[in-house]
Amino acid sequence: MTPSFDAIIIGGGINGAASAFFLARAGLRCVIVERLPALARLTTSRSMEAMRAQFVEPENVAMMRESIAFYQDFAARTGLEGYDIGVHQQGYLFLTTEADGLQRFGARVALQHSLGLTDVELLSGDQVRRRFPYAAAEEITAGAFRQGDGWLSAHEACFGFARASGAALRLNTTVSGLMIEAGRVHGVETDRGPLAAPQVIIAAGPYSGRVASLAGVELPLRIVRRHRVTIGQHPLIPQDAPMVIDQESGAHWRPEKPGAALAWAQAHEPPGEPLDEVPVNPHFVHQVLEGAYRLCPFWLDVAETLRRDQVFVQAGQYTITPDDKPIIGPHPQIAGLHFNTGYSGHGIMAAPGGGRLLADLVTGAVSDETNPFSFRRLSSLDAASGHQRLL
Ligand SMILES: Cc1cc2nc3c(=O)[nH]c(=O)nc-3n(C[C@H](O)[C@H](O)[C@H](O)COP(=O)(O)OP(=O)(O)OC[C@H]3O[C@@H](n4cnc5c(N)ncnc54)[C@H](O)[C@@H]3O)c2cc1C
């Protein structure tokens, strides 16, 4: 007998787990199929784990606000009493050194206010230096700050979603085929036998293109390496700081008790193939420290006094779409086949809103016609026109 479910979710990262949670809440019996021995082992475990509502596109602002509100109240919303996902709302501070930075940030903040994000603050260079003394560079001309942004434990959130979903788990199980007949999906083939369901969700992170190709579907995804540096402990790192971002370079850092996490989405990284073990650039630690001390000079003192055993560097991959927005919802020609992928570097912060939308599309509570993240929109985008997102 082929085990049978209402929905099969391919991928046990945060977006697979969030899909399972919201589908289960809608009454579907789900199974998460994960190739690796545990959940949250691929991209989800390598991220900066940060969340922000400071976007400028209305659909992104709405999705991130929904997601942040969910994370703030995770235990109650999931029914996991006392479950702690380590939310820290210490803010996100964007900094610029452009001569017309105050005007540019002013226009962006005004747009965000018009989208209902009225708690984004516009700061002059002097205001930045007074309020955030570690952002001491004289060149800073403006800042934009939102206290409600911050970070969380992506690992805890992923496991929390999976646990609260009550979904069956098939670990160490690789999906190797999609069963499609007469334009409708019926289940998946795996290396441990077939599974049947009328709904199949591809949430396979960087491998989503490969999984979609099993159905003859091409996804316009670019897979790009990104690093994260973790500094275990250092007395010079201010633990009350927000996420601090150099708008021009893209270098960013935040405290992570008792040290910090740093990243820099460098524009020159070429796209590559999906990988489980992403090789690390040995120069990245120096590069990101240099990137961070351009605007926050204390990082020079940290760098000079760092011991090798205080620094840990790892790399993962962004899964990037041509317009930097995820692909959520149905394939228009293959009934029952859905996507929840392509988060373009925002899959932690967007997971609750994305998972809720996916479930509403699967159940028909929301129409794909009004879905800003639809698969259908991709046909009107030129893959080559996608810009290089820095964060
Ligand atoms: C350095 C770095 C920093 C980042 N910082 C942030 C941040 O601050 N905030 C933020 O929101 N996002 C951030 N991101 C992006 C975020 O990590 C991703 O968007 C998110 O983790 C994607 O989750 P996912 O569930 O879609 O994919 P993944 O976590 O990659 O999970 C996909 C799963 O599918 C499984 N799978 C693949 N193929 C198969 C198959 N055939 N059969 C079964 N299972 C399969 C994989 O093994 C994997 O476990 C960052 C990413 C990186 C690399």
Image (cartoon, grey):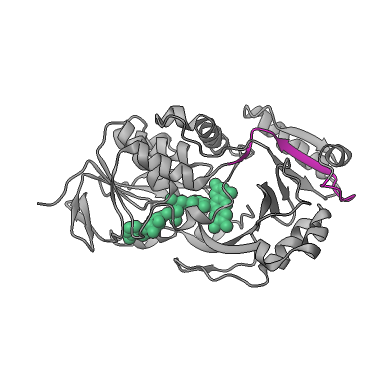
Considering only vertical position in the picture, is 1 above or below 29? below
Left or right of residue 389: residue 328: left
Left or right of residue 141: residue 358: left
Prevailing secondary structure class for the magenta stretch in the rendered image: loop
Residue interval drawn in magenta: 134-151
In x, y percent, where is residue 206? 44, 59
Considering only vertical position in the picture, is 201 above or below 292? above
Name the image quarter holding residue 115. top right
Considering only vertical position in the picture, is 50 above or below 322? above
Left or right of residue 127: residue 211: left
Residue at (58%, 61%) from the top-left corner?
Answer: 226
Residue at (84%, 43%) from the top-left corner?
Answer: 133
Residue at (43%, 37%) from the top-left corner?
Answer: 371
Which residue is at the front of the view, 362 or 282?
Answer: 282
Which residue is at the front of the view, 354 or 163?
Answer: 163
Q: Is 150 contained in the magenta span?
A: yes
Residue at (46%, 59%) from the top-left corner?
Answer: 221
